[in-house]
Amino acid sequence: MERKHLVVDRASAGSRLDRWLAAAIPEQSRARIQALIASAHVRVDGAAAKASHRLRRGERVEVDIPPPPPETLEPEVIALAVVHEDEHVLVLDKPPGIVVHPGAGHARGTLAAAVLAHAPGVAGVGGPRRPGVVHRLDKDTSGLLVMAKSRLAYEALTTQLASRTVHRVYLSVVHGRVAAGEGTVDKPIGRDPRDRTRMAVRPAGQGRRAVTRWRVLERFPQFTLVEARLETGRTHQIRVHLASLGHPVAGDTTYGGRRRVVPTPLEGLALHAAGLGFVHPVTQQRVEYSSPLPARIEGLLSHLRHEASREMRPDRHTTRPK
């Protein structure tokens, strides 16, 4: 464990702790600095502090920097919900609360490590810390994703993602009563300049093109069930795009604000990858998989339907998710 001792000078007074440390320790990325702060490896005058802490002149900052993670990933035996498996591909139904591959603050307990224990032959497919990973789901999003078990499958699936032929359908409960029946959000997404851990809709030329098509499935007085289809796959795309419409995903404190209340306990986000389709890399046949809404989202919908029926004001779309 390396320990650094720093003192805040007059010029740095008023700076955010995470930004100041990122400049003071340039060999560490800001994401790494924020992970160290979140895990209490950073102390200001002997006490743990938040990344947003505004520094004062003369404060003493101690930073404990653990050794870097190994270049290879250690297998971990973690239960997997396998939807389909053959020699080349593995389709999983991911629960909320698990990250897909190691990153800042998430060195262990990842889906990639679980897949490596389940299918050791995936080692060497893709990156050493992301074996088999073709695409991701956010930690608190559940649902379908495909992992590659062979190099042939990895190359074929990543090519399909790049050419936008992978079919991905999400179901989400969002805040607010969405007025329109359907629509398309075509807005660039990039890092939020005010907080690099977040993504944001950015002006043209300052982000990567992102396209989300959505339609309403069911309306409630204060919530709406929507289906979203991805044409591109940017980080946090659905969450950012729906929030940009004024309808953030229920349970999303990052893009929806902490003051928005969800009426039932909700583990993770009310966002589920319900449909996945691609061309099998060996058979060349189109394959489609579906995943029913998990209990946490069905429980929320059941509550909303009950409350709506009490008000005797049904307003339900004719199309319902399977």
Image (cartoon, grey):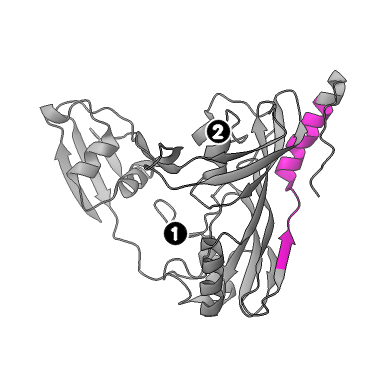
216 and 137: which one is in front? 216
Query: Can you name the residue that lies furthest to the top here?
Result: 311
Where's residue 186, x and y in %? Answer: 54, 41
Circle 1: residue type: Pro
Q: How many marks?
A: 2
Residue, far left: 10
Whether residue 183 appears in this view of the structure is yes
Look at 58% across and 36% down and name the residue there: 242
The vertical placement of 247 against 157, above or below, is: above
Bounds of the magenta segment = 287-307
Q: Tell me the residue at 68%/79% (across/down).
A: 283
Q: Quadrant of residue 93?
A: bottom right
Within the image, what quadrant is residue 291 found in? bottom right
Q: Secondary structure at mark 1?
A: loop
Q: Residues within 10 Å of mark 2 (few under 14, many from 20)?
A: many
Disc 2: which residue? 243
Q: Residues within 10 Å of mark 1 (few under 14, many from 20)?
A: some
* Main secondary structure type of the part rendered in magenta: helix
The answer to which of 80 and 250 lies nearer the viewer is 250
Q: Can residue 76 be seen at all in this image of the molecule?
A: no
Task: From the top left corner, tell me how far across and down residue 226 is, in percent.
Answer: 70, 39
Residue 144 x, y percent position in the rendering: 65, 58
Q: Circle 1 is placed at which residue position?
A: 102
Residue 53, quarter of the rendered image? top left
